[in-house]
Each structure stands twice: as structure tokens, then as C-alpha cells.
Image (tube, coloured by chain):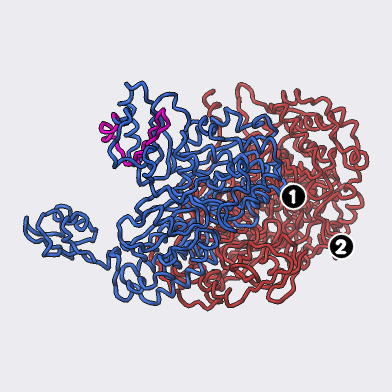
Amino acid sequence: MGKNNGHIRFVVGLGSCGIAAGAKDLYEELAAKMKSHPAATLTHTSCNGMCFKEPILEVFYPDGNHLMLGNIHKKDVDKVLEPLLTQKPVDEKFVIENSLQPDKVESFRLKQHKIVLENCGVIDPDDIAPYLEKGGYTALKKVLTSMTFEQVIEEMKASGLRGRGGAGFPTGMKWQFARNTQSEKKYMICNADEGDPGAFMDRAVLESDPHRVIEGLIIGGYAIGAHYGYIYVRAEYPLAIKRLKIAITQATERNLLGDNILKSDFSFHLKIKEGAGAFVCGEETALIASIEGERGNPRLRPPFPAVSGLWKHPTNINNVETLASVPWIINNGSAAYASYGTAKSKGTKVFSVAGKIAKGGLVEVDMGIPLRDIIYTIGGGTSSGKPFKAVQLGGPSGGCIPERLLDTPVDYESIAATGAIMGSGGMVVMDADTCIVDVAKFFLTFTQKESCGKCTFCRVGTTRLLEILERIAAGKGVMEDLDKLADLSVKVKDLSLCGLGKTAPNPIITTIKYFRDEYEEHIKDKKCRAAVCKDLIDFAVVEKECTGCHACFKNCPVKAISGTAKAVHHIDQKICIKCGMCYEVCKFNAIFKG
Amino acid sequence: MVSLLIDGKKVEAAPSQTILQAAQKAGIHIPTLCHAPRLSPSGACRMCVVEVEGARALVASCAAPVSQGMKVSTGSETVLRARRLNLELIWSNHPNDCLTCDKTGECKLQSLMYDYNVKTSRFVAQNPPTKPDDSNPAIYRDMNKCILCGKCVRICDEVQNQHTLAFSNRGMQTTIATAFEKPLKDAGCVFCGHCVSVCPVGALMDKPSMNKGRPWETKKVSTVCCYCGVGCSLVLHVKKGEVIRVTSDTYSPPNYGSLCVKGRYGFEFYKSPDRLKTPMIRDSIDQPFRETSWEEAIGLVARKLLDIKQHHGTEAFGCLSSSRGTNEENYLAQKFTRAVMGTNNMDNCARVCHAPSVTGLRAALGSGAATNSLADIEGAEVLIVSGSNTTEAHPVAALKIKKAVRQNGAKLIVIDPREIELVQFATVWLRLKPGTNVALINGLLHVILNEGLENKGFIEQRTENIDMLRQVVAQYPPEKTEEITGVPREDIIKAARIYADTQKGMIVYGLGMTEHKAGSHGVMSLANLALITGNVGRPNTGINPLRGQNNVQGSCDMGALPDVYTCYQKVDDPAANKKFSEAWGCPLPTKPGLKEPQMYREALAGRFKAMYIIGYDPAATQANINNVRSAMRRLDFLVVQELFMTETAKLAHVVLPTGCFFEKDGTFTNAERRVRRLNQAIPLPNGARHDWEIICQIATAMGYPMSYGHPGEIMDEIARLTPEFAGINFERLAGDGLVWPVWDKQHPGTPILHKDTFTRGKGRLNDLLYTPSEELPDNEYPLYLTTGRRLYHYNNGSMSLRNPEIHTISSEEFAEVHPGAVLWR
């Protein structure tokens, strides 16, 4: 990025993930230590997607060379600063990429194709200048100076872009509906209420490239005829909110927002509305209710928001990733975008790959690549090295896809055919240590708690589903429970009022479909093969391995372990709460779990 | 219209209708739990699901619009299975205590479980029960039984506009709560009981009715509320001679199921131990009363009144009847006064409330009554509410005003010195100094005429005296009006323009207009506003007094006034006098009689010897009670008919115990001229007699035989003598009653007056100058004090204070003074 002006430029990734891994400390340490060095500058960017390498430091030299270091912490600064400043080799363990070693390629970066994420981890998100340098707001200018709203909508239709929030509704059509409704006032809303456990695509985009989302939103406003916009962003994303606020101020100062944008007739005013932590507010009508200051309960459709939405005015809502795709499509043309992906799912899709994966992070790939490529080529397989079991797609609304379906291409229809959903892009990887009943229980615990409570099937149905799962996990299930689960799941799916309830049973339906044997094991054999369900497992000392090191004794929170130093220890099953602490701390594999 | 097939039956429906509405119209039943006719659809309960051919899943019929060619199945096996599972889910979370639940028999969940043959649930709840909330007056809440249909929340929001209840928490913890879980009283609740009325299960119950009787044990008696002039229709639930509960019919005007706290929970006064049950007499008011027989009491009254008539002449007697009494009782009271006592000294408590309405509206339009129906309020585009704290005084009429504003987008202009609740709903609030009504309205007229906003065609064709009016209002330009009234001139201009800019402008007013020395002038001024803008004679227009007591309209219609017989036929009109003389078989006085204040004056002067007061407590309710009490003490003979020992009764020589409205047959006429039947629900207390019987017995004892078998026969006599009532009889009044004038037995009634011509021919524009009130603040008495109404109490409190639930909410009166005024003192 940019020119170096003869300086060595250090860039630290300061996204939420980087900061959590210690990037802020790294940054401050570098700042303190580099103060006296006139030939070096220090700046920051946000997230480049390599969560598994955080904190990440990039160094750009005046000669054009560059170095990317990962897993580098404050304590490492003394070791690496001098060699970096003098362009000498540094400890190889930190080096992810080095322009002097073109053969050294991080496999995580292979098979990715960045459109939405093109600036993420590249530009300084707190400054509008780098975004402008990268061609930012040229799409807006193009739209305002040379395109009618019909042309913009046609361009979106031709691009084949579908809603990246998960439903996959064609964006151009959605805009067309909102445009078609006549009204003095309309609203354009960005849905940044990313709530799926394990999903962080939108957060990364907002933190790393906020202007891209704003630009997409303004273009959408122009297309549908809205002069007012909201970004509904969850309050749990403080850094995203901070950077969005800065971006809005900067865009307003440059007349990219406000009255008569870029001296055109078009005006657009943008506000941020912080969500209050309800998952259901990601649902369009609940989101609208929340902005209105009402309880975030979904509303009946019809009327659809495109006809009567926020304060009864026509309203269009798009997800962050959808809007972030818009400027690229306008700049590069719909044909270029449509050339990526499959017949029905065009362009690229961002996934956040998490769970038991070796290389977790943010991934953008062309639609249609097989899941296997994401899990293995990009993600490097499971983190434990144990066999891969399944991947949960689409968060609590999605489903589990087993090993044997890993060649499924990622496109809306193929994923749906497995019983999962594309969803917003959360991928949670599970290995042999994951209990499938526990997974279903985890997601149902989430949806049951997050149900707004309005309709019977979602409120009571998810609760009763969860209770049955809890019973099975506790070894108290009976075979009829599987029939009850199946019957109730289908009814909750068919009869709930909004998307939350309509998708909440998906984890149960898919896990029963692909892992029925594990459920039956829990019920019939009272066995949890992953040794997760506490009521079905015991911890015991393997006498011939025990060295009497006393570690388990010292760490047991309930004093269930007895034994003197250097003698074999013993676990009292009556006291044991199966927290697994002994298993964790034993260095001699002397604790048996199962 | 679109046509669709529901269960194979071809149904026509408007495209805006839902499948549920179309099915209901076609007589096809679809079960619901969260649906209510007056409320917006919610789609929460999912009971109403139906199968629509081609749809991905079952469809909630309460929300899904119909479409052309749609094929709907309301009872397919898929639908039935879904409903059964739904009931299983609800049941899994509902206490199984139907044996002792008060709702048994009218619980919607219970009957659906039965209809769908769901005997038990496969699912077992694991959530612990919570304690029912018995801490509030009037309303019992047991959230364990709540099925979260949300109807209570919606009716509190959409109908009552009180927003007291809301959903709280999420998921299975979702419950209905007040803000911060405060007690209802502190959370804005007005105890209208709407929430209870729509609760499909036993989660919300009318507290005073609990454990008093099951639905199948009670007789349902339809009647009219005895509190304010809205005249709500009531359904009394009666078990073993006791009223145990009051509800209302959702489909009956004028309230359509709405009631206020008094109507719904103010029904227990009748069984107060204070009820009078035996006639009491004494020779002098210094003596204690002594109980006596009816024969002796009636004989005494007859003897005394004949004696006074003989020795002091007919003008030494006056009768005051009650706006709480029925039409029939009021008719008999004035007949007694005129035919038996030979005087027109007849008045009723309307004298101090809405007599100026009668005078003012008659002078302007020819008829002293509301021009339009209460239902018209909802469709008005502009509403002027003047001198009416409607939410307190006429709570159910206020709901219509709120609906007009909130749901139908009407603009509201409030004219009131106080920041009443309706000010929150107002586009303009004209905060005038008390007593400057006429000046303010002249100011509004000035703006309209000055800016040429008047309806010239209407003025030309249908009114008279515009030139004089122009001359007078020319003296009230906005700046001068501001000076007199204290209302900023820009607000005066804004309000005038808003009202002149609509052809659906409706004026609603209350005692704030009439309870002034120039009260009738205020009313005429309002009429001027309606006349010059042409806002009269059509739906959603007109000028409409909100009557204070339940039968103010009726008591005046019945001629309980000093100058008129029924429906304002003048006593000094020879034709009318002749008609009534012949009908009643005796010559009648032609000189108009004394008004109530004049009676006190005459009594204080010693010229007035006897009064007969029926169901009216002026010794407690008049502004200057010292004056009234002194006047009464000077009487030789005072007869009072009452339910309780009121302040007036305490000054009487004879007190005769009578029946309350639960115990009566008869009719009331509400503020919109709707004559409606009261139906006796419970027997009179042992020892009490009906007012109409007492009057008849006294008259007969005095040598003027009066005898009716039933109040219906009195109404037949009224109908014979009153053209406006010619078409009214008790049979025709069954149901929702009739709105007078009802010219013949086929006539449907007249909800809108003055359609093509005014009762008096042309509308009269009265040119009126503002005259300041007589007693203005001075150094000695520096504050304005003005009276107001309280939602929880009514009139002298003789009834409302004797309701335990209401007493718990509000047990005392107080004066409100601005802190600044106190500090300044």
C-alpha cells in the first residue's frame, strides 16, 4: 500500500482479533522502540483474515521488498526490531511471507479470491485517504454522474449478486421492489447485526474497510430513491462502531454523504443504530422494530419492508457483505462479477472458518469451490490432527455437513440440498472430539434463548426440543425421543413466524440425518463416543501411567482426587463433577476419559 | 373483489382482507387465540394456520391476504395435526387447574383442547411456576396461565393508548410485564380492564368477580352504564340476585366492548350496607329520623304538599329531578310537578352542567342536542376538544379521539387551561385563561373570516346574521385575542386554519364550556365556528356536547326543565299547552317556572316552602353549598328520594329509599341521543320502591290517579306526546336502542341532525361579545380555581366511593396548585 517516502514502514494489524491476540501491545512496544529511528514509520491496518497468525506485522521497505510476520508479540520486538530495521534475516518462525523468498507461500492464501476483502488488512481503516487511493468512492461518483437508478438496478440484477446475509435473495430484485413503491420517504438500511456464533465476516469488513460498506449503502440509496440510511450494528462490535463513526464523519466532510453529494441532486444522510444484543434483530422486521425503539419482535409479512418498513416507509435492508460487493460491481461491471461463481450463485463469498481448524480465519472464495478446499487446502485440516467429523454451516440456523459430503460445492442450492444453509458464512469445524448431540444442544440452547418469545412454535417448540436433547445428553433419552424430535422439528420449521424459528431446528434435523448412530448410542448404550456429555463419561486414573506427580490433586476444584506424592492417585466418583481439569493437566496420559 | 375457494366453497372477498376474514364472512370457523376483531393482527399463536395450495408451508390465516383463485383448506389432516401439536405445546406450559380456575367454561384454550380432542401433551414443562400477582386492585394476574397471545398488550396500546403492558424478556422467559415490573397503579394503568376483557385464558381476571360464579351459572343481562353520558352498553353477570361481574359486548355501540374503570369495576356500590331500605320521616330537621311504613310516608308527603299548595299557592313548590334517573322517571316528575302541583318550577341537575348546551344549541341550530354520533369522532379529520378533560370525564369517548389521532391521522386542537392528557395527542393546544372562551373563539372566527377561509356557499344558503357576526368578530384580531386569553396569536391562527381547512371537522366540548355565567354564549360561539366552515349536517362533523351524567340528555328531553315539556315543546306555546293539558286531563300553567338557583333564592327569601328532590345531591355538589343548605333549611318540607343518606337527604323531612340502575327497567338517553333500554337485573332491596312507583303513589294519594303497569307504558305515553319519540317503544329499543328523532314506528332514527335544513330553518350566527367573569382574581383572592373531573369518581361520589376496588385506587380528593403559585404566596 502506497509509497514509503524513503521510510521503512511497519504496519500492525489492529482488528479485534489482532488486538485480542496482543497486537495492541505489539504496536505500542514498536512505537516506543522505534521512536528514535528516523527512517522508520509505524502505522496500522485491520484484519487480513489470518486469525491463526495474529498478531501480524508487515514491513515495507523503500526498495519495494516486503515481509509479513505472524504470531509476533510484544516480547519478540527486541529480538526482531534490529534485523528488520537493517533488512537482515529474522527468525524464520515468524515469517509468513517474504518477497525475497517467492517460494515461501502461505497455503491459506491459495484458492482465495478477494473482492469484498480486497482492502482488508491492507489499508488504514481510520483514514479515508488510502480508501480513496484504492479507488474508493469512484463507484459512487460513476453512479451519480453517469447512471440512472434503473441502470444501477439493472447492473445489480445482471451481476447475479444474492443477499449475503444468508437468504440469497437477488439484490437487484430487492432494490427494484423498494424502488417500485412510491413514497415521499424511503430508507436504506445496512444489516450489521451479525449474530451467529462463529461468524465474524461482517465485523472484519466493518473494522477493516468501513467506507466500502458506506459507499455500497449510498449507491443502494440512490438506486431505490432513499435519502436516509441506517447502519444497524450490534453494540458488541465497539471497534466497528468507532471506525464507522470516523468513516461517516470523513465521508460527510468530503461531501460523499449529506446534501447534494458530489454536487449532484442526490442527498443521503446516514446514522448508526446500535443493537442491544438480540440475535432476532438480525431478522429484517425485528431490526426495523428495534430502530423504531420498539421491542425487537418480528412483524408479520405482508406488508414487506419494501412496501412498508421503517416508520411505515418503504425500506430496503442489505447485509454488510452484500453492500461491500456493490462498489466493485459498479467499477468492474456486472459481467466481470458474474464471471466468477456458478450458474446460480455468482461472485465470491466470505466465510469465517472457526472451530477445530488448523488455520482459522476469514476466507473469500469463488462460489462453487468444494468445501473440501476450504477445510483442507485453505484451512489445513483439523487443528487436533484428529479425524474431521463435520462442519456446521450457517450458524444456529444452519446444519452439519459430514465428511462424505465435503465435495459439495459452496453455492446456495448445493448447500441447501444437504439440509444446511449457506447462511451468512460462519463455518464451524468439528473433529472426532466433538459430540454431535452436544452440538445440536449448543445451537438449540442459543436459539431457544434468543427466540423473541412471540410465536408458540418457536418459543415453546425450541424449548421442548432443547429439553429432549438435554435428556438424551444426560443418558435419559428413549428411542421415542428421536421421533418426537423429528416431528417437532419439522413443525417448528414450518409453523414459526420468522426466520429464527423456521431455521432453528436445522441443526437437529441435519445431525439426526447424518449422525443418527451417535444419537442412538447416547440413548441405547448410554455412551458418548466423543467423551463430551458429562453424564455419560467417567474420569479415572490409569494406574500404570500415573507417576504420582500430584498435578491432578492440586487442580481438582472439588477435592475428588486422593493420593500422596509419587504414589498412584485415585478419583472418587461420588465427588467428581467431571470438569475434566485432571485430564487437562495430566502430562502422562494417566487420566482416562470415557 | 377476488374470489377464492375455502374448503371447496366459493368465497368473494376484498383484496385487502385476510383469509381469516374471508372465512368468517363465509361462515367457516377457523380457531384463533391471538386474534381479536378490534386489534391489529399479530400472527403469534399459529392456531389459525390453514393449508393454501401451492404454499411452501401452512399459512397463518389471520395475516395472510386473500388472492384470486386461492385454494384454502381449513381442516385438512396436515392442518389438524399442526393445531394439535400447537395445543400440546401450549398445554405443556400451562397449569392443569381447570377444576378451580375461574375461567373454566369461557377459556378458549380449554375449549380448543376439547374441540381437537387433545387429552394430554407429549411434552413436559420443566420451567418452575411463578407466584400469581394478587397485589393490584381490580386486576388479578397469573402469568403461569399466560399463553403470550399479546392481546392485552395490543389492546392497551391500540385501544386504550395507555402502553402499560409490554412483553418482557426473551425465549421461554418471555412474559407480560409493566415497566420495571412496577405495580399497575404506578405503571400508567387506568384500570379500564380492556386487558382482562380480551384474555383468552385465566391469566388476567376481574378480581372482584373471582370465586363468585362460573359463566354457566350466571344470567347475562344487557343494560346501560349509570356513570357518564357516553352511555356504554353493559352486560351484567348475575348470580342469585347478585351482580358479580360487568363486561361489554364488542359489537354494541357506542362503546363496542370498551369500558372505563367505573363501568367495569364500579358495580359493587349497590350492596353497600349504607343503602337506604326503609322510608324515614321527621317533623323538623332538628329531630332525628324515624323509620316508618310506606303508607304513612306517602300519606304524609301527599298531605303536606296539598297543604302547602293550598296555603302558599302553586309557586311555593319546586321539584328537582335527576340526570341519573331514567327518562320515564323524569317524565313523571315533571308531569307530577305540572299536573299535580300546578307549577312549572321543575328543573334537574343539568342546570349546573349542560343546560347552557340546550339553550345555546337551540338558539343556533334549533335543537339542544348533539348533532352527531360518538362513532363519528373516529373518522373526523380535525377535532376541536374544548373544555373537556375527556380522558378523565368521558374515558370511552376519549378512546375515540385517541383513535382518530393515532390511527386515522386526525389533527386535534385542544382548548383547555390545563395540560390535560389529550394535549399529548394535540396538534395545537390553546391554553386560554379560564373564562375567556368566547373571546378565544371570536379570535378563531376572526382569522377564518379575515383570511377568507369560510365556507361561503354554506353561509349563504344555510345561515343567517353573517353581517352582524363579521362586525363583532372584527373586534377580535389575533393580537387582541392573545391579550384577553393569553393564547399566543400564532397558535390562534394555526388552529383556525387547520379547522377551516377540512370538511370533516368535529367539535366536542364539555363542562369547561358550559359551567360559566356566559356558558350558553360559549356554546353558541362554537356553533358559529361549525356554521361558518360548513362543518355540520354531515358525518364526522358537528358540535357535540359530552354530557356529564348518564341521562343529562334524557332528563332535559323529558321536560324536566322550567320552560318546556318533552323534547323542548314550550310551556308558553298555546298549542303545546293545550296538547298536554288535554292529555293529562287538567289545565297546566303557562308561565315558565323557576330555575334551580332561583328556587334557592326564593327559599332563602321565605317564599318557597317545599321541594321534592329525586336522586340529586345539590347540598354536596353545588358550587356554593352554604347557600344551598341555608335555602333547604328554610323549607317547610323537603322530600328526597335516594339510595344513600346524602348531604341533601340529611336536610330532608322525608327520605324515600329507591332502586339503583341494576334494579330498574326504563331508558337512558346518552350524549349522542341514543335511547337505550335498562333491564332490571336484580330485585330491589327489601323495603325500597321504584322512583316511578313512588311518584305515582304520591300523585294518586293527592287525588290525581297515576297508574302504569310498567315503565314501557310511560314510554308509550311519552311517544304519543312527543313527535321526536313517536316511533319509540320498548320493543323497538331492544338491542342497541334508537337515536332520536324517531318520527314513526318504521323510522330508523337520526344519528346526524340538520342534514338538509336546521331544526330552526336557518342556522343562526349569534354575534356575541366577550364578557369577563363576574368574580375575577383580586388581591384578596388572587388565584383562579377551576373544577375538574377525576377518572375514578363520579359526581358526589355516593356510588363510586362505595366500590371497594375503586376506593383502593383512589380514596380522596385534592386540589392541584402550581408550585409557583404556592411559592409566590
Share a chain, discs 2 and 1?
Answer: yes
Chain letter for the blue part: A
Between residue A258 and residue A275, name the one nearer to us.
Answer: A258
Query: Which residue is denoted by mark 2 in the rendering?
Result: B744
Q: Nearer the viewer, mark 2 or mark 1?
A: 1
Residue type (three-letter) at the residue carrying disc 2 = Asp
Magenta segment, which residues?
A54-82
Query: Which residue is denoted by mark 1 in the rendering?
Result: B379
Badge 1: chain ID = B
Chain letter for the red part: B
In which quadrant of the rendered image does the C terminus of chain A lie? Answer: bottom left
SS class of the residue under badge 1? helix
From this view, report whether residue B624 is shown above or below residue A307: above
CB under 8 Å between callouts 2 and 1? Answer: no
Q: Quadrant of residue B743?
A: bottom right
Badge 2: chain ID = B
SS class of the residue under badge 2? loop
Between residue B16 and residue A234, name the one nearer to us.
Answer: A234
